Amino acid sequence: MIEYLHWDRSQSNYRRMRKYWNQMLLGMAFVATVLIAVVIVGDARSLAKRLESFPVWYFLPIIVLKVMNWLFSYLEWHYFLHVIGVNPVLKGPTAPAPHPDQPATIRVQDSLILWMASLPFILSPGKIAEIIKALALKNLTGTPITRSAPIIFAERLVDGIAVVLLVGASAGIASDAIFTPGDVSPSYLRGVLIGISLFMLGLIVLIQFRGIIQRIITVAGQLPIVQHLENPLRTLYDSSYDLVKLRHLMPTTVFGMGAYFTDCVGFYFMLVGLGANPSGELFVQATFILGFSIVVSAISAMPGGAGGREITIAVLLSSIVGMGGAANSAAVLMIGIFQVWFGALVGIIIAIVFRHRLFPASLERELSALEEQHNDDPATAAV
């Protein structure tokens, strides 16, 4: 991906990264198409006038709040690295574990750069390109992919818990201002939240049955078709089990709530800048709307959550806040830019600047090996 951006002369490197770069291009095109549709539906001329009247100084707190969102989200990643046995250090080298009983180390600078460079990966369909983050970590610290890949799942789980808690809190504080008759059925809103909550709780509970799952892996490992997958599956499960222990979920969920709370404050500023009357009720409504749109976008599994997020925000702004017309379209457009494109562009810039540190030839060889393994045995590649 990064070498292709710079028109690297090495055609072999290009071929190895082309698949993931094409996936991200597809995601970017899809997200861009959604935003263009918002402009068309919202009447481009009226939308432009509404954006011109938006107070420019509001962008400063919105950008600061977005940076704070990244900080809280990075702290999740930082914490999970400790759990899987990779110690972020302020001083010292980024290196594999010198002994099996000792952790690998990664400089905080390298850890932060890797996390920021992975921001564009959410634009790939199903976020499949995020496996590159696990590969890059293996290249830097020697950590097996089966050990680090579950962090991607743990981050999504923690973020989901955090969002549901914030949405539930906002609904409890001002239910009359949210669950009112309108374009969206209150029973539908409650049903989605309850369904997602039960799903996440079920995943957490299921992973806790360690003895049963380990026994299933052992029995499955005796079958010829999956015999060679037993050790990778065991490592994958053990890492997932460690990451979702209650003592780890509690602090990381706090980080997740901090991340999404800052986004909610930024969304509130957008709505006020677009003409909504500032009030505590509006802030609670903004928290509910943004959080619920994140839940819907996660369910949709579309690149960057595009489509589900925009439709949900537009409908709920109209139904709950009573904001329509160009102001509604402007809010949808702005939140799309700050939720997806801002981070993606920053991540691409960081990835380009530090491409030799994060994406050396060894990483490209690893990607090539994984692709060949996938062609020979898709089940092995998945693990």
Image (tube, rainbow, N blue to C red):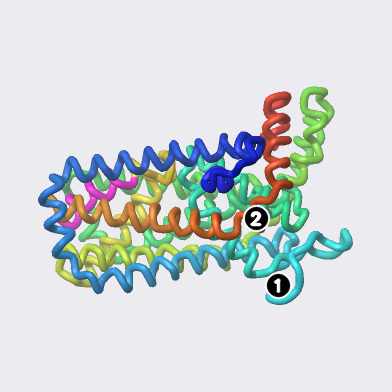
* Circle on res. 28: none
142 part of magenta stretch: no
Q: Residue at coordinates 37% horizontally, 59% vertically from top-left? A: 168
Between 308 and 115, the residue placed more toward the observer is 115
- Residue 130 in picture, x, y percent from top left: 57, 46
Q: Residue at coordinates 75% horizontally, 58% vertically from top-left? A: 141
Mark 1 falls on what kind of element? strand
Is residue 351 toward the left or the right of residue 207 in the image? left
Type of amino acid under label 2: His
Q: Which residue is mark 1?
A: 89
Q: Residue at coordinates 23% horizontally, 50% vertically from top-left? A: 316
Between 207 and 296, the residue placed more toward the observer is 296
Type of amino acid under label 1: Val
Q: Is residue 247 above or below residue 129?
A: below
CB-based contact (under 8 Å), mark 2 and mark 1: no
Q: Is residue 12 above or below residue 315?
A: above
Q: Residue furthest bottom?
A: 91
Quadrant position of residue 383: top right
Residue range highlighted in magenta: 309-324
Q: Does residue 202 show up? A: no
Q: Tell me the chief SS of the magenta region.
A: helix
Upstream in sequence: badge 2 or badge 1: 1
Q: Quadrant of the N terminus?
A: top right
Quadrant position of residue 42: top left
